[in-house]
Amino acid sequence: PAPPFEVQSVSLESEKTVCAGEFSKISATVLPVESKDAVAWKSSDESVATVDENGFVCGVDVGETTVTVTAEYFGLTAG
């Protein structure tokens, strides 16, 4: 079922650096807060860093990647 409020925006905190073997949590903001839409996380290059369903990023190797978050029902993306 659709969330009770339509998502108007999705955003991520600013750029982060994560070294190989380290973890870091990235926070996403979905507005309005009342939307309760689920989000999906993705790393553009999992050989550099992976991201789990809670926004925890694990550095894998040297390089750059973009982590994106998408409001699943409404499809808005930030990253």
Image (cartoon, helix red, strand yellow):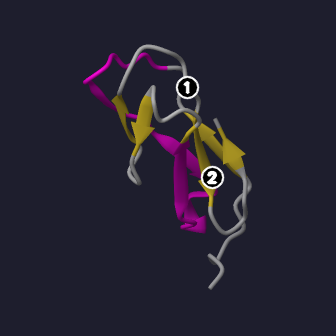
- The magenta-colored residue range is 16-42
Q: Label 1 crowding class (10 Å Cα cut-off): few <14, some 14-19, many 20+?
A: some
Residue identifier under label 1: 65
Which amino acid, mark 1?
Thr
* Relative height, residue 73 to residue 2 (above, below): above
Residue identifier under label 2: 70
Which amino acid, mark 2?
Thr
Q: Earlier in the sequence, mark 1 or mark 2?
A: 1
Look at the numbered disc 2 and give the secondary structure of its residue: strand
* Relative height, residue 46 to residue 19 (above, below): below
How many badges with numbers are in the image?
2
User: Is residue 26 shown in magenta?
Assistant: yes
> Taking 17 as reference, is 67 left or right?
right
Look at the numbered disc 1 and give the secondary structure of its residue: loop
Residue 5 in picture, x, y percent from top left: 67, 71
At horizontal 59% and vertical 29% (from top left) the residue drawn is 66
Res. 42 image quadrant: top right
Q: Nearer the viewer, mark 1 or mark 2?
A: 1
